[in-house]
Amino acid sequence: MSSNTSPSIGIVGGTGDLGRGLALRLAKAGHAIWVGSRKAEQAHEAADALKAELVSRNVAEPKIDGMDNVAAAERGDIVFVTVPFGAHTPTLESIREAVHGKVLVDVTVPLVPPRVARVQLPSEGSAGMIAQTLLGEDVHVVSAFQNVAAAHLQADMEIPCDVLVTGNEKAARQTVIDLIEAIGMRGFHAGLIHNAAAAEALTSVLININKQYKTHAGLRLTGIE
């Protein structure tokens, strides 16, 4: 990848609501997107639907293709993981070799159905911590986007939310903050991957708020220009 080329993005679990929303936003920002799924056929169908949606939003020739999760992880310069918590560990194990030396953005939240509105962090501390431990220090795990509603990402609108970005390497966090800013949001350095627990726990809090007020509430930081 040359310094003048936008990094391509592999989205593992990209056929879900959050993966689709991220694909739309990042493709509109000019990135080539590799949509991954356990079944390549489903990924191809999702990619075709995303391209049609982007064309309807006046995005000329969006670069999106579908494939299985491992292939998407191999092709992406930066890899997003957007799978349910129950599939988190086996998915990471399946792509471990493919993400060696890359920035991996873990969007997973440890929600445990049916009580998703109750904070239930894993014994390891967070999904982000699980990812960093399992993949090892050769993979630059960054945790982000847990508090942004998939409905906002998929809609053609300005998103009134900020993003907490945690990870052990500041340069990797900055890479993700640059992506966040490219899609029109604000991202903030929020410390080491240990702090991912805070953003992950907030998701259950927001689920409660959203149910109570019939909305898609997010997080905004004040006092920062």
Image (cartoon, rainbow, N blue to C red):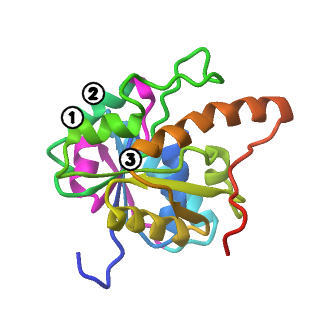
Q: Dot 3 lies on which element? A: helix
Work out whether residue 105 or residue 91 is closer to the camera in this orientation and state it.
Answer: 105
Tag 2–tag 3 contact (CB < 8 Å): no
Between disc 2 and disc 3, the foreground one is: 3
Secondary structure of residue under mark 1: helix
Residue shown at 40% from the left, 42% from the top: 194
Query: Residue 32: horizontal and vertical position, in percent?
Result: 37, 66
**How far is disc 2 from disc 3 in space, using C-alphas?**
20 Å
Find the residue positioned furthest to the left: 97
Determine crowd level at label 2: few under 14, some 14-19, many 20+ residues with C-alpha closer than 10 A: few
Q: In the drawing, what numbered circle is on residue 94?
A: 1
Image point (52%, 74%), residue name: 60
Name the N-terminal-most of marks 1 and 3.
Answer: 1
Quarter holding the C terminus is bottom right
What residue is pinned by disc 3? 193
Is residue 14 visible to the viewer in this orientation of the structure? Answer: no
Identify the amino acid type marked 2. Pro
Judging from the image, what secondary structure is the residue with disc 2 in?
A: helix
Mark 2 lies on residue: 90
The quarter in which the N terminus is drawn is bottom left
| Span of residues in magenta | 61-86
Residue ID at (57%, 34%): 201
Compared across the picture, whether 139 is left or right of 204 comes to left
Q: Amino acid at mark 3?
A: Ile
Q: Nearer the viewer, residue 152 or 117?
A: 117
